[in-house]
Image (cartoon, helix red, strand yellow):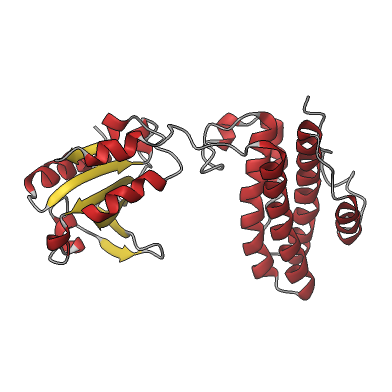
Amino acid sequence: MLAQERLIARVREVCAADDRLDAALMYGSFAAGEADAYSDVEFWLFFESQWRGQVDPRAWCAQVAPILHLVRNEFGTDVVVFPGLVRGEFHFATTQDIPSVRSWPARNAATNQMIVLDRRARLRQALESLPYRAPLPDGGHEAETLCGRFANWLLLAHHVASRGETLRAWDAMGHAHRHLLWMARLVLDRTQHWLTPSRQAEVELPDDVVLELRRTTAPADPEAVRQALRVAWQCGRGYWTELARRHHIGLPEDLFAEIDNALQGDLNDTARHAADFT
């Protein structure tokens, strides 16, 4: 049994014994049946509103297992490090937050696998209102928006790199990479892990595409970043062109020309040109 599975079993016991708790759910890899020894354990805990103020996240999580460290991340989630460096994400919420579950993009797991506790069946109703998978870009406008956002991050990286802010360019490229992965998945119809497009990308995308996408990454070295920008634009340009063809939408030719020129124009010798995806 994985250490995470023992932790999950203990979370279930603690939830069942806590009368202040109305509902709890597990999400992520273990709920979806995709977990391994490197996966996190992730939960939402919905307490009765009158009791939430009395719940101390550290003390509550310490009932599960010894805590090496606890920090509230930038999204308001309490992240616990358990022995073995297992990460646990715990959202301490109230019953008033249960309706907000309906606004999530998808479940990505079976409802029965997600529910840990549901004393009044309100959590099940909220979960079952969600699609199993997140909706994909619907039509040309959304595909065009996705491509435009890629170009936005790419151009930011280009401008700050030109200014000499290599670390800032390196940071911006991370955002461009995420959008490039979405574009690749959409073109190749490999959309299994849409919400986190890097997840299992090495398994789900063709080897030649993975190799090409790796060439869009770089150490924070000025010339390496410039080269990665050229390759990223070549990839993105090809994906954008194919998506435009499929959806019968126009390409921003003037934008393409200016980016081509800004990134030295000659892209043929930096990486494989985006292929005919039909």
Residue 160 at what x, y percent from top left?
73, 71
> Where in the figure is residue 118, as x and y percent of width and height?
18, 40
Q: Can residue 5 be seen?
A: no
Which residue shows up at 24% across the image and 60% down it?
68
Rendered image quadrant of residue 50: bottom left
Depicted 140 relative to depicted 69: above or below: above
Image-based side of 81 in relation to 9, left or right:
right
The residue most toward the top is 278
User: Which residue is located at x 70 percent, y 73 percent?
Assistant: 165
Q: Residue at x 41, y 47 (%)?
A: 103
In the image, is 213 to the left or to the right of 1?
A: right
Is 223 left, or right, of 64 in this rendering? right
- Answer with the quarter of the image where residue 58 lies: bottom left
Relative side of 225 to 257, left or right: left
* Quadrant of the rendered image containing residue 5: top left
**Quarter of the image where the N terminus is located:** top left
The x and y percentages for residue 61 are 18, 56
Q: How many marks?
A: 0
Q: Is there any visible trace of residue 185 in the rendered image?
A: yes
Q: Nearer the viewer, residue 206 or 186?
A: 186
Q: Is residue 76 above or below residue 200?
A: below
Image quadrant in which the C terminus is located: top right
- Nearer to us in this view, 183 or 165: 183
Q: Which residue is painted at 82% across and 29% down in the image?
A: 276
